[in-house]
Amino acid sequence: MSAFTEPQVHEEVEVDLFSSDPIPAPAPQTRPRPAQATSNRPYAPSAPSQPTRPTRKHTLPPASPSSLALALRHKQKGTEAFKLGQYAPAADAYSAAIDALPAGHLLLVPLFTNRALVRLRTGEYAGAGEDAGGALGVILGLASSSDAPGLVEAGRTKANEGGWTHPLGVGVDLGDGYVKALKRRAEAWEGREKWVEAGRDWEVLAGAGWVAQGVRGEAVRGAGRCRRMVSGSGASSGGGAGAGGPVEGPVGAGRKAPAVKPKPKPMTMGKSEPSKALLAHRGALAQAERDDNAKHALKDGVDARIAAWKTGKETNIRALLSSLDQVLWPEVVGVKMGLHELVMPAHVKKGYVRAIGKVHPDKLNASNSTVEQRMLANAVFGTLNEAWIAFQNGK
């Protein structure tokens, strides 16, 4: 009976979906062959066939041109609302864009990450985490697909206008989407005080060599912050080590941990720096909740004042600028502009720039304005921008 050699076993190569290095082919599996014990000739194997990487064909769901156009319109509305600080309308617009596309479409990646950011701003941490997870689900579903290298490269070059002119969404920057989704899921975990889960996501980002240095630095700080929170919250959240059980390792079977080791943890729980950060975080959440309640109570009154100010002159920037005193408070309006000061286009531009600078969302905050004043200023900011665009187009 002939003897057989043992088959060689090769470990599967782990593939980085977003690495710029070429994807390696796995080592070929060597089939058992009879030993050539009775022959004096050296064994000359035939040329092996080219090894192939085991992949699967991933079917990307297509979207019709009308669905793409509808989703893009809603996405643009969401982006404009977000820039104006109007988070609720922004979330609604992104939701409409998501609903216009089939499940698993590549364009859901930027839409999910955008809505996750909006929900983080409004304190909806559970929803933000779900959106980030939805984006990651689309991306990681491509990890073992033969289409993955081409899709990643198309995203790097922003092909097809970032995917918005392709029925399959080819051109979406999957690397950027992966970083944003993982980062926002980590932030959502932190918002829910899920420090262990947040730390895992931060550590993944920190260990990804292809991620930008700034993001990796932020991830390192986030992972350290989560470790400190877990360490300061006692054994219930950290689990395992330091709980007074037997010490694992070569120090001796059944040896107990010294009693002095777990004692410092309870002593520093109420005085550690992370606890102060947590209190500040909770205070910010409480303030955001109070602001949201105030916005709901003031919405009808603010909408009525804005409507009374702009109705009939939505695209007449001269009329809008000359009547700002009807809707804004004196400290912001300053010296009232009359129509006679807005005759020439250069005068209109000067008045528009001055007004926009005073009502810009970045200029107003809780220290220099009330919630109602910020709501009025945001609405005026958007109205003046639209009127300015109409003015430029009509020149």
Image (cartoon, grey):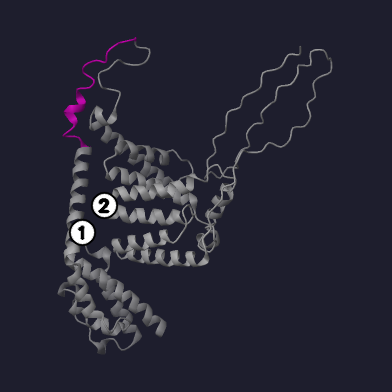
Residue 270 forms part of the magenta stretch:
yes
Question: Which of 231 and 209 lies nearest the eye of the viewer?
Answer: 231
Q: Which residue is mark 2?
A: 123
Residue type at tag 1? Asp
Residue 362 forms part of the magenta stretch:
no
- Against 75, residue 42 (above or below) is above
Disc number placed over residue 373 in the picture, else none: none
- Against 102, residue 377 (above or below) is below
Q: Which residue is pictured at 23% across the width and 83% down the height?
A: 322
Gap between marks 1 and 2, in whole Å? 10 Å
Magenta stretch: give its range: 252-273
257 to the left or right of 55: left
Q: Does the residue at mark 1 contact the one at mark 2 (Cβ under 8 Å)? A: yes
Question: Quick one: SS at disc 1?
Answer: helix
Q: Is residue 257 visible?
A: yes
Q: Which residue is mark 1?
A: 292
Query: Percent from the top left, x then y, of residue 231?
Result: 26, 31
87 to the left or right of 98: left
Q: Which residue is pictured at 27% across the width and 15% down the height?
A: 257
277 to the left or right of 170: left
